[in-house]
Structure formats: C-alpha cells, structure tokens
Image: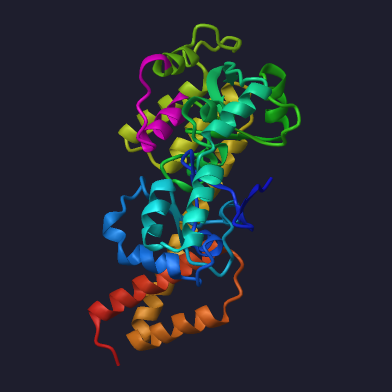
Amino acid sequence: MEKWTNINEKQILTKEFSGKRVVTFKDVDLVHERVNGTASRNFRSNKEHFIENEDFYIINITNDEIRRQFGVKKNAGRQLILLTETGYLMLVKSFTDDLAWKVQRELVNVYFNVHHLKVEQSKLQEPYKLTKKFYNGNPVMVLKDLEFLIGTSVHTIGYILKSNNQFTIGVDYFLLEGKELKNFKKNNDVSKLIGSLIVIPKQGVDKLLNLLLLKPAGELRETFERYFELEKPVPQGKNKVPVLEQLQACKFIADDLKVGEAVKMSIYRMVCEKNGIGTAVVDKIEHRKKLDKEVKEITMKYGVYLLEHFTTHEIIDMKNQWVYDNNVKSEKVKSYMLKLFDIIIKISTKTKRTA
C-alpha cells in the first residue's frame, strides 16, 4: 500500500531504499517549488562532491513494480537517482530563500528522521518475534525476518533478489505459491493471508549480506549462526541431508566439473523427485535458460543480417524509427532492443565506413 507524506502542503510518495528514506529530484523540485529540472541540474553540476551509496543511489528501472514503488512514470529513463538525507542536504545548499529553510526543516524532521516515530510505534505494537522456519528440512528466512535483523526494507530486499543476476531462483531463494505455500504455512509461523512468499536459505542470506556490505558482529552474528544451525530440522523421512543442501552441493559439483546445463537440470530434477517434492522450480529454470538461448540465437542472426545488408547510417535510422513507432509495453524489451541497436551500430562503425 502506498504511503504519502505532506511537505509544504505538497504530497510526495514515501520511498525507502537499502533501509533509508530517499527522495527523487522531482520530489525536491516539487516541495521547494522550483522549476522542473532544477534539482537534477544542481546535482550534475556538483556530482564530484557526492558519494554513491552514501549520498545517492542509482537503480535500474526494470519493471512496473519498481515504477510504482518510486513513483516513476513510464516515459522516464531506464535509471533513477535516489537521494539520501545527506545527499538532499548537500543538493539544497544553494537554496537560501525563506521557503527553502522551512522546507529543509520539515523534510528532515517529518520525512527523513523517522527513527523516533518507529520507536513510538513499536511501543504500541507487539514486537516482532524471530521464529525459526524450515523449507524442505533446511532453515530459511522470510523477507520480514531480514528486515527485522538488518533494517533493510522488505521491498528493497525483494527488488535485489529479483533484479540482481547473482541470485538464482531455486537455489538462492524460493518463491512459494499454491500447494508449496500451503504446506509451508502449516509447519511455520507465518501469516495465513499471504498469497505468495519468498524464502531464503543460508546461501542466499550470505550473498545478500555480502552485497549490502554487511558483516554481522557480536550478538547479531550469533543470531544468524543459531538460526541456521541444523540441530532440530523438520523430519525428512529417510533423508539425512536437507533438500536445499543437496541441490546446492549438486550445483557446486556440476560447476566445478563444468557439466552442461542439461545434465545439471537432470540432477536437480532427480534430487527433487527423490525427496518427493515438486519439480516446478527446476522446470522454470530450464524453461528460462532455453528461452535465453533462443533469444541469443535470434539476436545474433538479426545483428549479422543488419551488418551485411545496411550501412551504419541506415541502421541508426532504423533505431530512430523503431523508437518513434514502437508500442511495446515491456520496459525490459525496450531496453533490450535499444542496447542491441547500440551494439550493432558500434560494430558497424568500426568495421566499415558509413555511407
């Protein structure tokens, strides 16, 4: 559900990324009553003074869910810059009118400084309890567990898992739906109302912490270690090794031996069938890899055809015409096509003279 914050009698969408409140250039222009583009221009003029991942973040806009989360229109670019509190305060240093001082104070106290509000709310709400959860015999965490432990929002963690190619569904995290989710609910302390759920084994959690540059220490480290101990796993019949560990071990061995993808998928399927669980995840991975291969083959043929039959200028005209005429709704497809044209144009420029 979207949340909005009132600043200077203007409504801005409440946004969080990597556990921090953030704003866009558009938000800054709106609440400071500046001409559109003012904040962006100021940032570009002084970018060397800003530190990425401290004063600002750059995220890729890959789907409509991300657009809704950060209030981005469909005709916007493929990347979005998000300002943290320090980035915002650095950006508006040049805003010295009376309104600017009022807005800065309001944004800091009402929007960015939410820690005291969360403390007050926590007094009224029942504190979150971290309970150990198992999926196919292996300890797993849900997004809410990680939000509770490291402070990074559920939305941010979900975005990282789905958009970063370092994370593989079926190995680093699992999307539970239908019967799988129903069985998980029976054996674990989660809301009965959810229609889908992401669960993350130790391997995925370790990757996430590494990506976020977090190294748990002291009590937090002990909490993670205790959570993923395998002293009392959910019974697995005759199996002594939890299913997720079997799948992960298969992956490591297959990678070391440089086993082909078809053989690797067969091993995954065999492990799932042996343990009496569905092979839907394996089917999804296999189907996606087949599609990726087909797309690459078609792309190569199309690129070769353009390079052999058209000049660089003609290819550039084709790209411009495609941008003008296309009515493709998928932002991912648009991004892919533009990158493809740019690569072909670059190759064409290097290999032959333009007409």
Give the dominant element type of the magenta stretch: helix, strand or loop: helix
Q: Is residue 251 above or below residue 135?
A: below
The question of residue 330 being in magenta is answered with no
Q: Please give the range of residues in magenta.
A: 202-219
- Extreme residue toward the bottom, this view: 355
Q: Position of residue 173 (x, y in %)?
A: 52, 33
Visible in this render: residue 299?
no
**Which quarter of the image is occupied by the C terminus?**
bottom left
Q: Position of residue 148 (x, y in %)?
A: 54, 26
Residue at the right extreme, as displayed: 193
User: Which residue occupies the foreground of this view, 22 or 303?
Assistant: 22
Q: 218 or 286, which lies in front?
A: 218
Q: Quadrant of residue 96?
A: bottom left
| Quadrant where the N terminus is found in the figure | top right
Residue at x 51%, y 78% (from the top left corner): 323
Give the answer, above or below, for where 334 lies relative to 206.
below
Taking the spot 49% from the left edge, 15% from the top edge, the residue there is: 227
Question: Looking at this view, is 335 or 113 the one in front?
Answer: 113
Above/below status of 296 relative to 19: below
The x, y position of residue 43, in whole percent, is 37, 62
State the residue at coordinates (55%, 45%).
111
Left or right: 235 as drawn, with respect to 335: right
| Residue 215 part of the magenta-drawn span | yes
Instruction: Please tell me whether residue 218 is drawn above or below residue 153 in the rendered image.
Output: above
